[in-house]
Image (cartoon, rainbow, N blue to C red):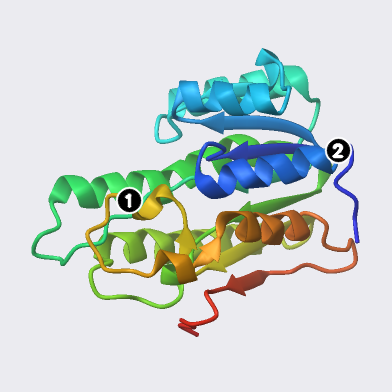
Amino acid sequence: MESIKGKTILLAGATGGIGKETAKLLMAGGAQLFLTGKTEGKLADLAGTLKLDDSRWMTADLTNSSDVEKLHSKFSTVYPSIDVLINASGMGIIKSAELLSEEEFIQTIQLNLVAPFLLLKKFLPDFKARKKGLIIHIPGILGKVPMAGAAAYSASKYGLVGMLQSIREELKRTDIRFTNIFLGGVDTAFWDPINLRVQREKMVRADEAAKAIWFLCQQPESGVVSEMVLQPFNHQAI
């Protein structure tokens, strides 16, 4: 297994339930971490907890190409190269198609698909310059198995998977690795605004999901974990 000690890691979506737990594990492992998220207060609190100075975190709207440009610029002033990019950002709206508004559909596509594209467009040249590195995304289980009421979410996540597979083909003569982790239900604030009867006490815990990402950051140089599926034990979709 590769060690994460000393690796430069950009963690997007750091203020979410999974992102926060992942950040803690990566810092404990000695990673050189840079955090980004949309909510400044939450990001500042997390950075303070991890004792990260102001140069190693930045709030950004990842759907805005100008913000992504500024993020790349600030990251590059701190670290000369990037070893790992983890995108834990995203949103979910669960409601039937006839109740789903055009605005909600577009917002979901923007954050779950356009934002990853903008991040990759800006940071891929850095990976390509070294011809190595690791890129981790979290399509979620609904990027593999559709669910009633998840038209926007599944569309965005299926699109994300297709985009990543295509880019991976472009880079297959390099040692740049792509890993997708398909998470089932994880007990985070993701579910707070969703009007759906779910048993959150039986879901995967956020710290357990973070351990899976932490593990994936240490996959061996001689191989790649292309996909990992982690689901609640009582509700296996695949």
Residue 143 falls in image quadrant: bottom left
The residues bearing labels 1 and 2 have C-alpha atoms spaced at a distance of 33 Å
Taking depth in this image into account, of 49 and 102 the one nearest to the observer is 49
Residue on which the image places disc 2 = 30
Measuring 58% from the left and 34% from the top, which residue is drawn there?
A: 122
Image-based side of 94 in relation to 225, left or right:
left
Image quarter in which the N terminus is found: bottom right
Taking depth in this image into account, of 56 and 103 the one nearest to the observer is 56
Foreground label between 1 and 2: 1
User: Is label 2 in a helix, a strand or a loop?
Assistant: loop
Q: Looking at the image, do the residues carrying marks 1 and 2 touch, with CB atoms under 8 Å apart? A: no
Taking depth in this image into account, of 184 and 59 the one nearest to the observer is 184
Measuring 56% from the left and 60% from the top, which residue is drawn there?
A: 205
Say if residue 110 shows up in the picture: yes
Residue 212, relative to residue 78: is it above or below? below
Residue 29 falls in image quadrant: top right
Image-based side of 152 in relation to 6, left or right:
left
Residue 185, relative to residue 68: is it above or below? below
Choose the circle earlier in sequence order: 1 or 2. Answer: 2
Find residue 200 and report its horizontal and vertical position in percent: 42, 64
Residue on which the image places disc 1 = 192
Say if residue 128 shows up in the picture: no
- Tag 2: amino acid: Gly
Residue 154, relative to residue 108: is it above or below? below
Spot the residue most to the left: 98
Residue 90, relative to residue 42: is it above or below? below
Find residue 6 and report its horizontal and vertical position in percent: 88, 36
Find residue 44 and report its horizontal and vertical position in percent: 56, 21
User: Is label 1 in a helix, a strand or a loop?
Assistant: loop
Image-based side of 133 in relation to 206, left or right:
right
Measuring 49% from the left and 82% from the top, which residue is drawn there?
A: 234
Find residue 212 and report its horizontal and vertical position in percent: 69, 62
